[in-house]
Amino acid sequence: MSVIRVSLPGRSYEIKIGGGLLSQTGPEAARVLRGRKIAVVTDSNVAPLLGGTVLESLRGAGFDAALLTVPAGEKSKSPAMLARLWEQMASFGLTRADAVAALGGGVVGDLAGFAAATLLRGVDLIQLPTTLLAQVDSSIGGKVAVDLDAGKNLAGCFYQPKLVLMDTGALASLPDRTFSDGMAEVVKYGCIFDEPFFRRLLACGSRAGVMAEIESVDAVCCDWKRKTVERDERDTGERMLLNFGHTFGHVYEKYYRYETYTHGEAVAAGMISAARLGERLGVTEPGTAARIGEILRVFGLPTEIDAPREALEETMRIDKKTLGGEIRFIFLRRIGEAEAVSIPLAELFEQL
């Protein structure tokens, strides 16, 4: 088992990575939680596979635990579903000493995390990520949110968990498309921070190759996220680099109504779009987009998604990195080196 500690003033916590950790949820939660009542939020796909394991472990450790299940998919990350969870948690009798556990992928983690942050002005939260994307990205760092009709993640806050348990065994049951969805975020870390890691992933060559090294792969990604969050918890500087590919990616997700492409697929194509834009502007080393495309194709990820210019402009105008007519756009200098560059929206739109 690997253990990574995220050190933040008054809000530090451990990330534990290894096989079989969900069966240890109860004892691990008992170490860090104050109360003994916990609402486990999961989705309709994960509940029948892993919900029983987590409830048994929690109850065995003396917790009064309930499973709250939402429909699987991005559409559950909505204000309406958030309100439903608030009511269910209140009916369950959660107090400010109690906790919420997020058991699932990024949608569940974001939704349950926002519910925990806002119910009773904040109850304790533990993250139990079961997808690769959630393990390497969304469960770490405290970003929780829901989507609005106007765009993705536009209502949310920063709320750090008390513990993150990453059971690598949970990844075995993922469909190939869901595993590849997470690989987009794994590749992103190589693109923005770590060229040797990028080459290592390419050498893995397949899902099986990555799974043979999955604890180490998870740990590398989590450690890069840890370093970034510790230096910039509120996403005003260096942490913005983690949004590489997301400016275009969020456009693609929204335009196709969160139905056609997964988050990782949209980010994958978004990374190519960002690299091509950087090459046109002379910011990015020529050939970078081609190198990213090579590794994305290995893991079955798209390298191009069509969206009309109007959709690009509309979504970028309300991007969280847009301020005063400029956007802090994340470019690569080269593989392993990223930079946030302030660029006027009008100039950016000319290059689309």
Image (spheres, grey):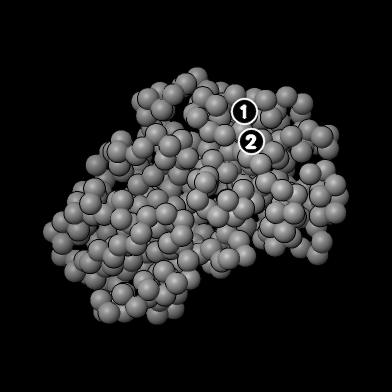
Amino acid at pointer 1:
Gly
Report the residue at 53% width, 45% height from top. Answer: 261
Q: Is residue 297 left or right of residue 93?
A: right
Q: Residue at x 69, y 57 (%)?
A: 315
| Quadrant hosting residue 126 | bottom left
Q: Is residue 123 visible?
A: no
Q: Quadrant of the N terminus?
A: top left
User: Looking at the image, which is closer to me, 208 or 312?
Assistant: 312
Q: Quadrant of residue 4?
A: top left
Decide: is 128 above or below 144: above
- Estimate the x, y position of residue 53 in percent, counting from the top left: 19, 51
Q: Which mark is residue 75?
A: none
Give above or below for 123 relative to 342.
below
**Tag shown at residue 293:** 1
Badge 1: how crowded within 10 Å, few (<14), some, or many (20+)? Answer: some
In front of the other: 335 or 110: 110
Which residue is rendered at x = 52% and y = 46% of the image?
260
Left/right of residue 342 with respect to residue 243 in the rendered view: right
Q: Which mark is residue 304?
A: 2
In the image, what residue type sits under mark 2? Glu
Closer-to-camera residue (180/59)? 180
